[in-house]
């Protein structure tokens, strides 16, 4: 067991360079609370968790302050290209840090969800990755022991994300999380209808008075 590897806090990698074809407008820039969907996720990773945060965006104007911004100039190449760029930025730090993958269109992930997953990775040194399953649905963040998986992940192409690759590995820890009295952290906002529904849910109280579950 590598003690340094097990105790170094993760670097958050927020993927926000998608083409948002079903939404019809860039999802990361959509209003959310007093910021945007991307700003909301970054506020959680950077401020609440206190993790170094890498954000992969489609153009430099989208990047929030206080993060390591990486521009994916060919987002049409698919999510694998954004994943590669974000993880490469973590590797270039040269500190052996785990990487925690977040999506900009999953605003119901909370800091305590990420901390729970981080603790799982710390206490399972043989696992190359940990991912949550919220009420039966695989979600984020996915935590990776990056130096162990980089050779494989760097070969992914197109719209092939981590899901299929992780599902085929025996050394990935998938654990169940029961979500009660709040929206599922695995909820992706992919369409205008889903976004409107989520907006209506969040204004029912969010973290202070939890909304009805989805």
Image (spheres, rainbow, N blue to C red):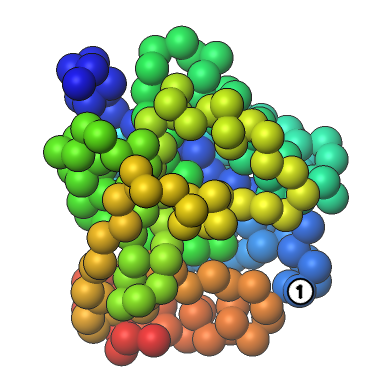
In the image, what residue occupies the spot 72% across and 54% down? Answer: 159
Q: Let me know if residue 103 appears in the view.
A: no
190 on left or right of 137: right
> Camera-side residue: 174 or 210?
174
Of 53 and 175, nearer the camera is 175
Q: Nearer the viewer, residue 146 or 17?
A: 146
x, y (%) of residue 40? Answer: 46, 55
Q: Position of residue 16 (x, y in %)?
A: 63, 49
What residue lies at 84% left-to-right and 50% top-to-bottom? 76
Q: Element under label 1?
A: loop
Image coordinates for residue 9, horizontal then vertical, percent: 28, 28
Task: Count residues near mark 1 (Cα–Cα under 10 Å), then give few for <14, some for 14-19, many for 20+.
Answer: few
Rendering quarter of residue 58: top right
State the quadrant of the C terminus: bottom left
At 80% from the left edge and 68% from the top edge, which residue is drawn? Answer: 21
Q: Position of residue 103 (x, y in %)?
A: 53, 54
The N terminus lies in quadrant: top left
- Where is mark 1, residue-wise? 22
With 54 as the anchor, is 147 left or right in this view?
left
The residue under the point 64% across, 86% down is 193
Tell me if 46 is positioned left or right of 163 in this view: left
Q: Is residue 133 left or right of residue 146?
A: left
């Amino acid at each position: 067991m590598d003690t340094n590897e097990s105790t170094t806090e993760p670097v958050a990698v927020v993927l926000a360079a998608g083409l948002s074809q079903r939404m019809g407008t860039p999802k990361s820039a959509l209003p959310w609370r007093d910021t945007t969907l991307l700003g909301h996720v970054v506020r959680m990773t950077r401020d609440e968790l206190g993790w170094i945060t890498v954000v992969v965006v489609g153009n430099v104007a989208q990047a929030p302050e206080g993060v390591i911004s990486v521009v994916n100039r060919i987002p049409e190449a698919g999510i694998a290209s954004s994943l590669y760029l974000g993880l490469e930025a973590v590797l270039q730090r040269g500190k052996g840090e785990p990487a925690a993958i977040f999506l900009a269109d999953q605003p119901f992930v909370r800091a305590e969800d990420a901390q729970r997953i981080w603790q799982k990775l710390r206490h399972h040194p043989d696992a190359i990755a940990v991912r949550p399953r919220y009420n039966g649905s695989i979600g984020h963040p996915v935590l990776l022991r990056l130096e162990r998986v980089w050779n494989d992940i760097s070969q992914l192409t197109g719209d092939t994300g981590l899901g299929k690759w992780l599902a085929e590995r025996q050394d990935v820890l998938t654990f169940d999380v029961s979500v009660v009295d709040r929206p599922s952290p695995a909820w992706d906002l992919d369409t205008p209808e889903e976004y409107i529904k989520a907006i209506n849910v969040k204004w029912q109280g969010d973290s202070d008075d939890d909304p009805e579950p989805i």
